[in-house]
Image: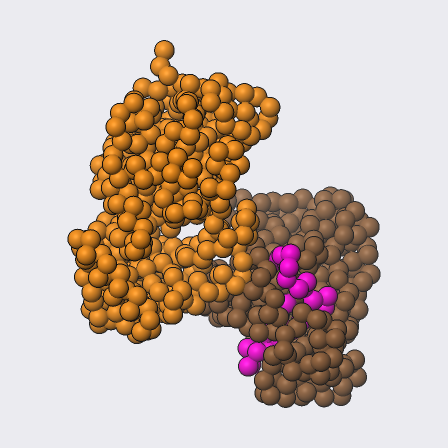
Chain colours: A orange, B brown
């Protein structure tokens, strides 16, 4: 009889782990009242460790870059097992700025990345508009980072669910109440026995185990989904990350002329309201980078809760015997799904994990 | 056997006619693929003939005022027959302005309305904020029009559907293809025989009868639905109609701290996309009148197609023997529902119609 694994949480992290564990021969159950919803559903889907890089967070960049290297093979395997496109988009990323301070910030980022040996090209506004004609005159300079990619998070989720189904993963559509070694207590009062539990419940993880109290917090983000309309300039081919007078904004292209806008961050607890002032800012900042957005259809507004950690690295490892944690991925859940699944599988098999993931050990906070 | 009436269109106009006709003893069928959707579902629900008044459109004001007088009794009867609240809100309306030109415009409107004997009070910004503390410092003056009311369009639709059901109205969930005297051709190829057909298909009416070609056109409008969040100032008690540097905006309160924002107008055919630039303008203009909106939850964005006519009066009367039209109500469908239903019932009974409705005869365009 194969070992029984219960994965608590059916977002991109939980589903990636469930799929890979089931494919490796474990008997896998996923506990989630609504798999594939939450922040995984709302995500922008950037695979962008380089343009997200921040001096002092070298561990975050190293782990993100390690996962990005795994993405093409992970996507190919997912496509084969799911029988559907997981939505990987390989056109690259531009990081652009508007005022002098934005451009100074980007120049500093370029210098930092170059010092780490990353591929970055500084471009003028004219050069940027040559690459992406929809960028407006306010864009004065930026970086071309061809290695930072994106994925359509909803195609990715659908592919993960199909791959889980193809590998016999069982879904239990109930909320978890507590995760303990050897068992998971459910909200409906029933108990699931497990040999290994993987806690992958995103922003809710800290509520499910006392050892995570205070280590993972919800960070609300709002996104707008737009669709090109006839007569307007088409969306960019690449992801565009902008800094508009210090305010971050990203524009991520989707298939069929779709475009996702995001960037708001609120530290306000478990609140998923889309707030009018946030939508106003996203629209104004996005229009400043790409004026034709005014003519796009607004097809959806949504908010999700990123699972923030104290140092922007996830918590990835044994929390106690029989209980693994894979949570706290903050802005990078989609990016980090391949390396997270690999690390969890290696831990389940008592193998050495990839060196870039060692800094994410949950014991670092003790 | 009672006379058979087929009503083409299940918006507020079609449903009001169907309910009153069924209550009067007619055998009534309503043809609509999705009753209660369309512009009736999207509407702001203002009952505001006075603050909508425009010099030169005295017929529109007279018809609107005639319908507004009928609203309280119509609502009471609807409540009794539907067994549910039709959502009439009687707190009145403020018309406010921001810059000097906005205020001049309001002063001219006040003078015009006073000359017609309508109740209007001019107020300073301070007096307006005394009535509605959520109005911001940019509001410099305006009018108090206690007689202009509002209705929750979705409660109204639900009550109309319940009253129709209680009176035995039959719903046929298919689109009409053509309306002819004595019969209605449906999109699915079937034919409905009728003794009298009432064409009440809003912006689509001109497509259903050659005699209306060019007389009714779609005028797109977008609305945002917001909800108060703890910590923000509560929504106004009254409807607030604003002019922000010449741009119209309205804020209509709803039960449970809801608020509807609207006012965009596009003459662009049968297009129901919500456009990013329209949402941006609605939010910016509404915030200028009521800054606390920035902290409200944005719960819905939607667009509907008002049925515009050449003179802003509806087309209301016999189009040919056996075929009545009740369409082209433009911004005033909810307001004009009671008088429209009454006029149609009087025409079905060969009675004299109310004098204010005579200007709406569809023959006026010939």
Residue B167 image offset from top left, x and y in percent: 76, 46
Nearer to me, A49 or A272: A49
At x 25%, y 28%, the residue is: A352
Residue at the limit of the structure toward the front, as seen here = A366
Q: How many marks?
A: 0
Residue B85 image offset from top left, x and y in percent: 76, 52
Does the image show residue A200? yes
As for residue B259 lying within the magenta part, the answer is no
At x 38%, y 67%, the residue is: A246
Horizontally, residue A344 falls left or right of residue B277, namely: left
- The range drawn in magenta is B226-251
Residue A197 image offset from top left, x and y in percent: 43, 25
Nearer to me, B44 or A75: A75
Residue B154 image offset from top left, x and y in percent: 66, 54
Residue A31 vertical placement versus A91 (above, below): above
Residue B19 vertical placement versus A84 (above, below): below
User: Which quadrant of the figure has residue B98?
Assistant: bottom right
At x 35%, y 36%, the residue is: A361
At x 31%, y 19%, the residue is: A25
Q: Assign the C terminus of chain A to one quadrant of the image.
A: top left
């Amino acid at each position: 009889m194969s070992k029984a694994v219960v994965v608590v949480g059916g977002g991109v992290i939980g589903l990636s782990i469930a799929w890979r564990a089931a494919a490796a021969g474990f008997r896998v159950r996923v506990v989630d009242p609504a798999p594939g919803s939450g922040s995984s559903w709302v995500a922008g889907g950037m695979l962008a460790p380089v343009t997200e890089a921040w001096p002092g967070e070298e561990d975050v960049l190293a782990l993100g870059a390690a996962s990005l290297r795994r993405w093409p093979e992970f996507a190919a395997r997912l496509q084969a097992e799911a029988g559907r496109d997981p939505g990987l988009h390989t056109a690259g990323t531009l990081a652009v700025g508007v005022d002098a301070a934005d451009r100074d910030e980007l120049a500093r980022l370029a210098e930092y990345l170059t010092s780490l040996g990353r591929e970055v090209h500084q471009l003028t506004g004219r050069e940027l508009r040559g690459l992406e004609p929809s960028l407006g005159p306010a864009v004065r300079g930026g970086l071309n980072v061809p290695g930072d990619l994106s994925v359509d998070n909803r195609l990715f989720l659908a592919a993960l669910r199909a791959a889980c189904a193809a590998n016999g993963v069982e879904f239990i559509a109930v909320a978890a109440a507590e995760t303990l070694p050897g068992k998971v207590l459910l909200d409906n009062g029933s108990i699931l026995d497990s040999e290994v539990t993987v806690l992958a419940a995103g922003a809710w993880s800290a509520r499910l185990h006392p050892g995570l109290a205070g280590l993972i917090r919800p960070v609300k983000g709002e996104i707008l989904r737009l669709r090109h309309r006839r007569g307007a300039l088409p969306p960019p081919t690449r992801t565009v990350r902008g800094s508009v007078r210090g305010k971050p904004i990203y524009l991520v292209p989707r298939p069929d002329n779709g475009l996702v806008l995001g960037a708001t961050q609120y530290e306000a607890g478990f609140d998923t309201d889309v707030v009018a002032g946030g939508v106003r800012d996203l629209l104004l900042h996005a229009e400043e980078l790409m004026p034709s957005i005014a003519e796009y259809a607004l097809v959806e507004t949504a908010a999700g809760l990123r699972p923030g950690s104290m140092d922007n690295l996830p918590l990835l490892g044994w929390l106690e015997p029989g209980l693994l944690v894979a949570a706290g991925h903050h802005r990078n859940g989609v990016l980090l799904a391949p390396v997270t699944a690999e690390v969890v599988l290696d831990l389940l098999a008592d193998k050495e994990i990839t060196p870039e993931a060692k800094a994410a050990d949950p014991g670092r906070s003790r």
